[in-house]
Amino acid sequence: MVPQAKGGPFVFWGDLAGSCAQAAELGYAAVELFLPDPDAVQKTQLRDLLDRHRLKLAAVGTGAGWVIHRWTLTHPNAAIRGQAKKFIASMIDFGADFGAPAIVGSMQGRYENEVTREQAFRWLGEALNDLGAHAESRGVPLFFEPINRYETNLCNRLGDTVAWLASLHTRNVKLLADLFHMNIEEVSISEALRAAGSHVGHVHFVDSNRRPAGGGHIDFTPVVAALREIGFAGYLSAESFPYPDSQSAAQQTMTTFRRIASAN
Ligand code: LER
Ligand code: MN
């Protein structure tokens, strides 16, 4: 739902009602939303849509704060860090009304110029402490997503991120394991998932080249086996390019998921 994210890894674009209908038709249990802001969709309308198609809301992204406004939690300007935090808090509130956690991924930003690595981690930690507590008060976890080195120089891998999150006060921040980023950063995707264990709260289920699962070179069999082993009970969410088109991407993800799930 964010035109400025054109070219990004989103299966469906623009037509929320039509997209929900297609997802439900293909057997999806839930949808993940990427909104420009929490007022972009009327809650009553979304509730009707989800109820009509027996869908849940799996999660809501917050990356529009970066894509549209260039806000991040580690920006050198305190007012901009404040805007970033306020935006994420408003998406936490939006999602919580549907039992869905918000995601902090690209809003972690990066350290550069006058901001040191230590300073950036301090700001990020303070923000996640507050936002994690806020999410807890609304009855949902907060998902935090390590992303690859070309998008951030802060949190790139699951293991390092778990160790750093342990230094925070909040225990309400769970990992989002995005298989595209993990393919770039981890020694072994399945071993990293196994080591992260109960910290994993959500998965972006996508292939090595960000095409729908099955369109790249990730071997999903050990990945799904690791998720079973750690007792993962969250969503595998298709965050892929609409390649070759939205309908085919949604279909291919489901076909791959069913093939692996039934064989495991
Ligand atoms: C968002 O989920 C993601 O994976 C990031 O690459 C967006 O920049
Ligand atoms: Mn992702």
Image: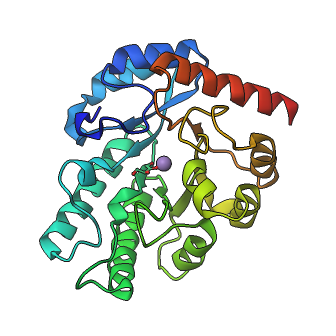
**Residue 221 placement, left or right of 83:** right
State the image coordinates of residue 61 (x, y, percent, origin top left): 38, 46
Seen from the viewer's position, the closer of residues 130 and 124 is: 124
As displayed, is residue 178 above or below residue 214? Answer: below
Seen from the viewer's position, the closer of residues 8 and 204 is: 8
Res 122 quadrant in image: bottom left
Residue depicted at x 64% and y 38%: 216
**Residue 39 placement, left or right of 99:** left
Instruction: Name the quarter where the N terminus is drawn.
Output: top left
Instruction: Name the quarter where the C terminus is drawn.
Output: top right
**Residue 85 placement, left or right of 56:** left
How many marks can you see? Answer: 0
State the image coordinates of residue 155 (x, y, percent, origin top left): 48, 69
Residue depicted at x 51% and y 19%: 23
Residue depicted at x 52% and y 74%: 165
In this view of the protein, can residue 117 be seen by the observer?
yes
In this view of the protein, can residue 53 be seen by the observer?
no
State the image coordinates of residue 39 (x, y, percent, origin top left): 20, 37
Which residue reaches farthest right? 263
Residue depicted at x 16% and y 75%: 78
Res 260 quadrant in image: top right
